[in-house]
Image (cartoon, rainbow, N blue to C red):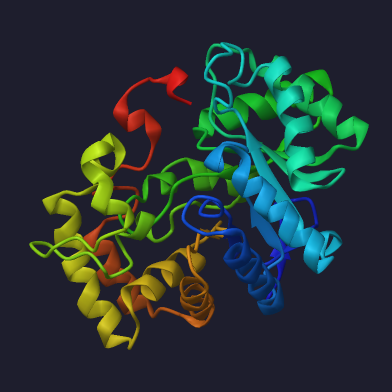
Amino acid sequence: MNYVNFGRTGVKVSPLTLGCMMFGMKTDLEDSCRIIDRALEAGINVLDTADMYSRGKSEEFTGEALKRNGKRARVVLCTKVFNRMDDEDPNSWGATRRHIIEGCEASLRRLKTDYIDLYQIHRPHPEVAIDETLRALDDLVRSGKVRYIGTTTFAAWQVVEALWCSKELGLNRFISEQPPYNLLDRRIERELVPMARTHGIAIIPWSPIAGGLLSGKYRRGEPVPAGTRFADRESSPFLKARWTDQTFAAIEEFLPLAKAKGLPLSQFALGWVLRQPGITSPIVGPRTLEQLEDNLKALGVTFSAEELAKIDRIVPPGTHTSPYYDADFGPHPHRW
C-alpha cells in the first residue's frame, strides 16, 4: 500500500478509504467487523462514516469493530455532522454551533472513542454564517475532541470562503473536501480540484463507482437485480435522475474498454478515479466482503494515454451524464 499525504497535514493515508455507510443498513454487525478487519489487514487506514447513516448504527458498528480488534490508534477515523437526527427537534440538524457540539458528543459515544481524526460538515448550510460553524469546530479541535476538520459536497467558492474566514479569525482551517466523483460525473475537475491543489486540500471522493451504476450489474433493458440500490429508484428522486439513457449509453462504451483490459467495470471505474490528478483517497462503500475484495484489486489498475483519451471522448472532462450533487435537485435543507 502506497500511503499519501492527507492534504498539507503530513498525515499519511491509504489511497483507498473504507466507507461505512452500509454498516447497520444492509450489513450486520458481524459482517461489518469482518469488512473492517480485512480492510485494515490490506493496509487501508482511513474509515469514513457519518452520524446519520442508519441514524447512528454505522458509527456504533464502526466503534464496536475497532474496540474488538484494538486498532483504533492505527486508524484515521472520520465522521460527519449536519443531518437531522431527531425528527421532533427543529434544531437537530445543520451547521449551527448547537448542533455541531451536540453531534460531536453523540458521535464520540457511538464510536467508543475520545477523539475524532476528521470531523466533517456533511453539507453546506447557507442559513448559518461560516464563522459560527468554524468557531464551533475550532473549539472542538482546541479541546482535543477533534484533530482535523473538513467539508463534504461544498462548492469550490464555499471552501475558499471558509479558508479566508479561518485566516481572518485565526481559526483552524478545513483540510479536506469530500465531493462526488466518478466516470459519469466529472464536474469537480472544473474548479474544485484546481482549488484543492492550490490550497493543499485533500480530496476524498464519494461514489467512485457511481453508487453501483458502474459495477457492471445494471444493463439497459434488463431486469434490475432484486435487493440492489437501484431496485428502489422509483422512490428516490436522486436515483431516478441518474437512471437515464445518456448514462447507459456511456456505460455501454466503457464496458468494452474494461473488457479489453481484462477488468470488471467496477475495477476499471475505481482505478480511473484513483489515478486522477489531485485525488487523495476515494471512498469505497462495500456491502459485503466480496465487494471489498473487488475494490482492493483496483489499486493495481493503470491507464495508457490512449485509454484515457478514449474515456475523455465518452464523458469529456468537467462534464456529466448523471447528477450526483444535491444542488442538481434544488434547495431542500430540511431534508437533511
Above or below for 299 versus 99: below
Residue 43, picture quadrant: bottom right
Report x, y in % for residue 266.
Answer: 37, 71
Whether residue 200 is visible, yes or no, is: no
Report x, y in % for residue 68.
Answer: 79, 64
Left of 264 or right of it: where is 129? right
Left of 271 or right of it: where is 50? right
Report x, y in % for residue 269.
Answer: 38, 68
Residue visible at 27% across and 70% down in the picture: 216
Depth order, front residue of 36/165? 36
Residue visible at 33% across and 86% down in the picture: 261
Residue visible at 55% across and 28% down in the picture: 83
Which quadrant would the N terminus be assigned to in this image? Answer: bottom right
Depth order, front residue of 122/170? 122
Q: How many labels does the image show?
A: 0
Residue visible at 30% across and 54% down in the picture: 184
Residue at the far left in the pictured view: 221
Whether residue 188 is visible, yes or no, is: yes
Report x, y in % for residue 87.
Answer: 52, 19
Above or below for 105 versus 280: above
Residue 281, picture quadrant: bottom right
Left of 177 or right of it: where is 69? right
Depth order, front residue of 135/288? 288
